[in-house]
Image (cartoon, rainbow, N blue to C red):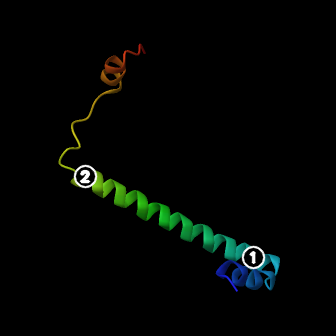
Amino acid sequence: MSNRERCIKILDSFDEAQLANIAAMLQAAADAIDDAYCSALYAEYEADPDKGEAVSLDEAARMLGVSL
C-alpha cells in the first residue's frame, strides 16, 4: 500500500471537524516549508558576493528602454 493510499484510508475514518483540523495542520506544514525555502533563498542571496548593487525602478526601466 502506498503512502497516499494509507493517508486516504486514515482520512476516510475522520469526521468533518477532524478533517478541518487535519487540513489546517497540513496547510501550516506547507506554509512552514515555504517559509523555510524562502529564508534559505534569501540567506543564499545575502551570502552571494556577486549579488551586485540595488537599481532603482527608474534606472531599471531606462536600462530596458521602457518609459514610465
Q: Which mark is nearer the camera, 1 or 2?
A: 2
- Residue most toward the front? 1
Disc number placed over residue 19 in the picture, else none: 1
Q: Which residue is mark 2?
A: 46
SS at mark 2 in the image: helix
Residue 1: image x %, image y %? 70, 86
- Looking at the rendered structure, the kind of residue marked 2 is Glu
Q: Residue at x 21, y 39 (%)?
A: 52
Q: Residue at x 80, y 86 (%)?
A: 13
**Mark-to-mark CA distance, 1 and 2:** 40 Å
- Residue most toward the top? 67
Q: Nearer the viewer, residue 2 or 62?
A: 2
Q: Is residue 15 above or below residue 40?
A: below
Horizontally, residue 31 falls left or right of residue 47, namely: right
- Looking at the rendered structure, the kind of residue marked 1 is Leu
Q: Is residue 49 above or below residue 7?
A: above
Residue 68: image x %, image y %? 43, 15
Sort mark 2 into few (<14), some (14-19) or many (20+) by Cα contacts within 10 Å. few
Q: Nearer the viewer, residue 58 or 48?
A: 48
Residue 50: image x %, image y %? 20, 44
In terms of sequence position, does the residue under pointer 1 or pointer 2 come before the other? Answer: 1
Horizontally, residue 59 falls left or right of residue 18, namely: left
Horizontally, residue 44 falls left or right of residue 25, namely: left
Disc number placed over residue 2 in the picture, else none: none
Q: How many circles with numbers are drawn on the protein? A: 2
Q: Residue at x 23, y 43 (%)?
A: 51
SS at mark 1 in the image: helix
Residue 22: image x %, image y %? 68, 76
Sort mark 1 into few (<14), some (14-19) or many (20+) by Cα contacts within 10 Å. some
Q: Residue at x 41, y 16 (%)?
A: 66
